[in-house]
Image (cartoon, helix red, strand yellow):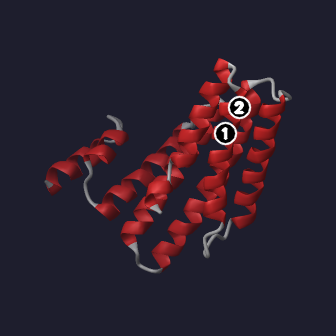
Amino acid sequence: MRLLVGQPEYHFHMASRYFARGDRTQAAAEIRAGAAFLKLEAGRHDATNKTGLEDAAKHLDDLAAGVTKGTVKSPKELDDGFVRADLALARHYHQVAEASVAQNEHEKTGYWLEGTADSLDDGAEWSGHRLATDGKAVVNGARFLMFIATGPSPALVSRFGHSNECSRRLWSMKT
């Protein structure tokens, strides 16, 4: 399931690009693809945020229909739908991470925390806002915990950016 984390975001970005180019058919197809991933997550046997994911997916399906019909006129309407979906995913990934902690599945916990962090970051981006310092600290903290749980990864270290020198030090100690 790790490979599915981040997939909705890819489709949201593609939908936004197609919409900006005036290709409503492709934009709607990408929105529906993103909605399908939310439905997959909602279908998990342990999806405690099932209703939130299903509501966000339905909203995306309605948004796709509006894009196709031409009733969606503004990129902001897309952005609002993507924010809603990202927040539902963040809540879901956080709940799955909590369940993984309870089962002492530390590596899985790290992956789900990274999904939580990415979804929060993505939602903030779609909303047109940057995460406040405290919010960014939470996101970086979740990524750092993923780093601790799963071991060093050059891709993850590069995502921490220069603001978290601690991750670089851990990387150098582990290699």
Give above or below for 1 relative to 79: below
Q: Callout 2, which amino acid?
A: Thr
Residue 126 visible from this viewpoint? yes
The residue shown at (42%, 60%) is 111
The residue shown at (53%, 40%) is 10
Q: Tell which of 152 and 172 is nearer to you.
A: 152
The residue shown at (77%, 24%) is 74
Question: Which residue is disc 2 drawn over?
Answer: 25
> Marks 1 and 2, how far apart in space?
6 Å
Residue 125 visible from this viewpoint? no
Specify the label residue 6 is tagged with: none
Q: Residues within 10 Å of mark 1 (few under 14, many from 20)?
A: many
Give percent across and percent down for residue 136.
50, 41
Give above or below for 75 relative to 174: above
Q: Tell which of 167 and 55 is nearer to you.
A: 55
The residue shown at (25%, 46%) is 154
Cβ atoms under marks 1 and 2 closer than 8 Å = yes
Q: Callout 1, which amino acid?
A: Ala
Give percent across and percent down for residue 90.
59, 54
**In the current view of this chain or complex, which residue is farthest to the top?**
21
Give percent across and percent down for residue 40.
62, 61
**In the current view of this chain or complex, which residue is farthest to the front?**
25
**In the current view of this chain or complex, which residue is farthest to the bottom?**
103
Question: Which residue is disc 1 drawn over?
Answer: 29
- Secondary element under disc 2, as helix, strand or loop, is helix
Give above or below for 67 relative to 112: above
Q: Residues within 10 Å of mark 2 (few under 14, many from 20)?
A: some
- Secondary element under disc 1, as helix, strand or loop, is helix
Number of numbered labels in the structure image: 2
Whether residue 109 sits left or right of residue 50 in the image: it is: left
Give percent across and percent down for residue 49.
68, 65
